[in-house]
Amino acid sequence: MREHEAARDWIRSDETAKQMLSRVLGDRAFLLLPPLHRVPLRAGNVVEITGSSPTAKTQILIQAAIACILPKTWNGVHYGGLEKLVLFLDLDCRFDVMRLSDMLKHRLLEANRIGNGAWWQLEESSGVKNCRGAQDKSKSKSKIVYDEELYVSCMKRFLYLRCYDSLELLSSLKTLHYRIRLQEACGSQVGVLMIDSIGAFHWTDRLSSSLALDKNNRKSLSLTNVVETIVQEMKKLMRVHSLVVIATKATIYEEKYPTNENNRKLSSNNDKAQQPPFREFMPSSWQAFVTHKIFIRKSGDHHQSSGQQSLSAYSLEWLQPQLSSIDRFIVDDVSKLDPFK
Amino acid sequence: MAPLKHLEMENPIIDACFRDFCSSHGILTVEDFLIHDLYELAAFAERQVDADRLKEGITVMLSLVEVKCRPWLNGMELLEDLQRNKQTLSSGDNGTDSLLQGGLREGQVTELVGPSSSGKTQFCMQAAASVAEKQEGSVFYIDTGNSFSARRIAQFICGSSAAAVLRKRVLSRISCHTVYDIYTMFDTLQGLEVALRSQEQMNVNECRLRLLVVDSISSLITPILGGSGSQGRALMVALGYLLKKLAHEHNIAVLVLLKFRGIGCVILLQSSFFLISPSVLKVTNYTVGAGENGKTKPALGETWKSIPHVRLMLSRDNRNNSCTISILKHTSMLSGQTVTRKDNQQCL
């Protein structure tokens, strides 16, 4: 009888298709991170944002990071975030935390202003928080204070590391798994891994490839090997943790096609194969790893109606998957404005 | 590239047996270890006789690598470090200070670009004088074009009533080093790094290095850039990262100067002024070249644009005798803002 039961247990299914779908959608849900919200991203996607310098790429990363670290709701105010950790690998070593902090504060203030119609005043006195909700319908400019505790908890979800060369990057990636496990033991999950400027060590690695001496049986520290190992380590990470990878890439060659979007649209009717508007320099192992591609270019100045100085406008184009619309945006002082046409 | 056998003394598990196994897979140094797949290596180790010992060796190696890694900092810790260690240094000129919201920032590389005789060197010397006098920090001035003038700096030290003693003390904080090629530059900077590290260990805080100036980084880099080879650009990137590391780890401001490259005048390369203030690294890198449609091309190439934190452009208007500073790029401010000031300012 025991064998019958064992056999029956083995044949019986673990879960139905509906259960599996709900489990997978819950674990690896779709993320909509503005301003990359045109295409919903899932865990396992690798997004590459290319643009020359300066084209607000780090700005996009910061905005996506804020969308990730905010909670969904807090104290009754809806923020719409994912409440997950963001791992920021700074290879460019130019990250300014004040920018992140200012944008987060602005976002919190805005959400407080438009959320629920209630104006909250929060006071913090030696750790004890008093919340007084004032249902003020009139437009009196009472002090809108953002929630300090929320701000601190959001900032703590942003993890940052800088690497000054590829060896440091490799050693960080190899030990990343254990560190994520430590963080997850505290209860928080990793949502996004961001890499600022994946091509930062391109030239120094290329130099090491040309200097590689010992060829027999040894893998040299060449550009292809280093990038292959980086891709390998990241694939291993993505198998175990459900995260999205967003990497920026600064073009290191000048734009060969000094075109604006109009020219490209005219020429694309003739071309069968769409030429990328920049010269690709990353090895093929990285190119195969990337699942989504975005290209940002400067698109002329935007003159503000209020007579202030003109701000530079940029256009964001999805290359993979190819979307026909192009988003344009400008970077304002405190926050990034919504795409305008 | 230290070979593995140097680790045996402190970690007896990395014995000859382990090293033989590693070398059979082509791993002779720690760097080789980093580019190999560790799970694959562990799987190979399974097949060996002393599998457990080998796998333990791999784990020990991994933990050694982890010890060397930097810790992950969260947002609050970054803010704390910024507020505690990285101050803003006045650049000596009120207009510039208001434009940059305080002045040159420690931990950042600032680049100053402009055509020749637009006042870049004056700006650098004014900043050096201001840092040495007001912030009481020392200045490391790297001069590549013999444009350093102690007399001019003395003029910037405020007040004709400044006592000779004060002037002498302030000037003694500025050390000038002449460097004519990039290899000497690497040498100098690495020596500086070692000196700073030992200084920090001994906790000497008075008169610490705050500003590092590199007058004309372009005169160091342009001779080695050329053609499609990667050596020149690799050296340039390595220099840029060394400056960024100095700036961030030792809380120095780095100021770098770059000269313009005129159309047709290939010889006049833009020199970047690197005013390296141990607190603030300012780098100026600007080039004007015969680009398409008369656009300006970067002097040191597209790659250099991602090195400095802040890029400022200095332009001079000879009719009004004024010069304008505009922001080309900043990590936390909008670009395009400008400020104009009159010339011949002796002191604030």
Image (cartoon, rainbow, N blue to C red):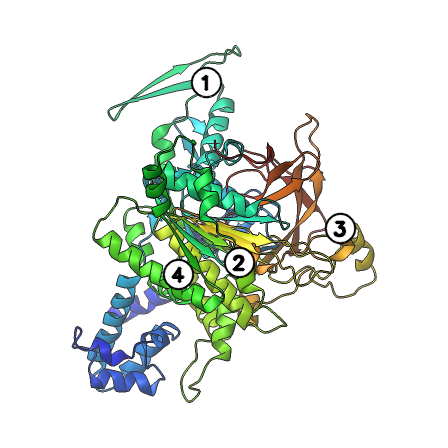
Going 32% across and 38% down the picture, which residue do you hit?
Answer: B165
Residue B91 image point, x, y percent? 47, 39
Residue furthest to the bottom in view is A216
Q: Amino acid at mark 2?
A: Gly
How far apart are the alpha carbons under marks 1 and 4?
Answer: 57 Å
Residue at the location (23% across, 70% down)? B60
Residue at numbered disc 1: A118
Residue at mark 1 shares a chain with residue at mark 3: yes
Q: Mark 2, mark 4: which one is toward the viewer?
A: 2
Kind of residue at disc 4:
Leu
Q: Position of residue B305 (x, y in %)?
A: 57, 54
- The answer to whether residue A279 is left or right of residue A260 is left
User: For mark 4, what is the residue?
Assistant: B189
Is disc 3 surrounded by few (<14), some (14 to 19) or many (20+) residues within 10 Å? few
Find the distance from the CA under tag 4 to the CA under tag 3: 45 Å
- Chain bearing tag 1 is A
- Quadrant of the image occupied by residue B271: bottom right
Element under disc 1: loop
Amino acid type, mark 3: Glu
Image position of B60 with respect to A151: above or below? below
Q: CA distance from mark 1 to mark 3?
A: 45 Å
- Type of the residue with mark 1: Ala
Quadrant in the rendering for residue B321: top right
Q: Mark 1 or mark 3, which has the lower sequence index?
A: 1
Residue at image position (60%, 33%) is B342
Q: Which residue is mark 2?
A: B145
